[in-house]
Structures are given as C-alpha cells and as structure tokens.
Amino acid sequence: MKNLIHQTQQAFYFSLGFYILAFILWMLNFSLAHILISIALLLSLLWTFLVLREIMLSVKLTNTERLLLIIFIIFGNIIAGAVYFFFLREKVIGKAIKK
C-alpha cells in the first residue's frame, strides 16, 4: 500500500485550519461557522484514521507504546494531533521528516 505520510500531515493541517477559522467565525456569530465545524470534524476523522494506520503499521513501537498512542490520539484529538505531529511522529515513522 502506498505510503501516506504527506497526506496525513495535510489532512491534519487542513483540519486545524478549519477548526481555527470556524472558531473565529463562531465567535463573530457568522452562520457559516457550523458548516466549517462540520468540515473540520470530517477532516479530523480522516487524519485520525490515517494516524492510527501509521501507528499500527509502525515497526519502531512496542505494543505498549502503540496502545498508549492510540488512546492518546483518540481521546486527545486536535491537541494530541499537534503533539503527535511535532514531537512523536519521527519515532513512529522511523525517519526524519522534512518540515
């Protein structure tokens, strides 16, 4: 199966952008905010599945680390995603990622 490293990161950044934009529009009482929140949730679901796939296919993690990361990603959502992409992803993938 094709490696989806860049697509996972793009989905996370799009989700984060839509969350921020939706929150700003929600604070300003725009009606479009609810639609953007829905789009952000769908993108969040997409990157969550892609991250879970990366974690499950990783040969660099022990089973305990794998389980803890899965729980962290599922319950932490956007905050856990930021921690994962900026601090933990290199260990999961096993190589340095160009930023």
Image (cartoon, grey):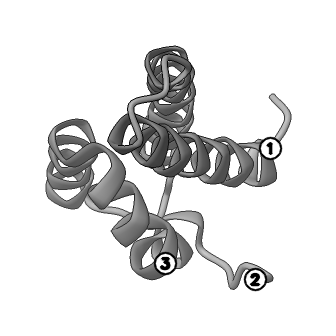
Q: Do the residues labelled 3 and 2 touch (CB within 8 Å)?
A: no
Q: Mark 2 points at which residue?
A: 99
- In the rendering, at what x and y percent does residue 91 appear? 47, 76
Q: In which quarter of the image is residue 14?
A: top right
Q: Which residue is drawn at 80% across and 44% down?
A: 3
Q: Looking at the picture, does residue 84 appear above or below residue 57?
A: below
Is residue 3 rendered to the left or right of residue 28?
right
Which marked residue is nearer to the observer: mark 2 or mark 1? Answer: 2
- Mark 3: few/some/many CA within 10 Å (<14, 14-19, 20+): few
Q: Mark 3 or mark 1: which comes first in sequence? A: 1
Q: Which residue is drawn at 34% across and 43% down?
A: 27
Q: Residue at x 73, y 49 (%)?
A: 10
Q: Mark 3 or mark 2: which comes first in sequence? A: 3
Q: Name the residue under label 1.
A: 3
- Work out whether residue 88 or residue 58 is closer to the camera in this orientation and state it: 88
Q: Name the residue under label 3.
A: 86
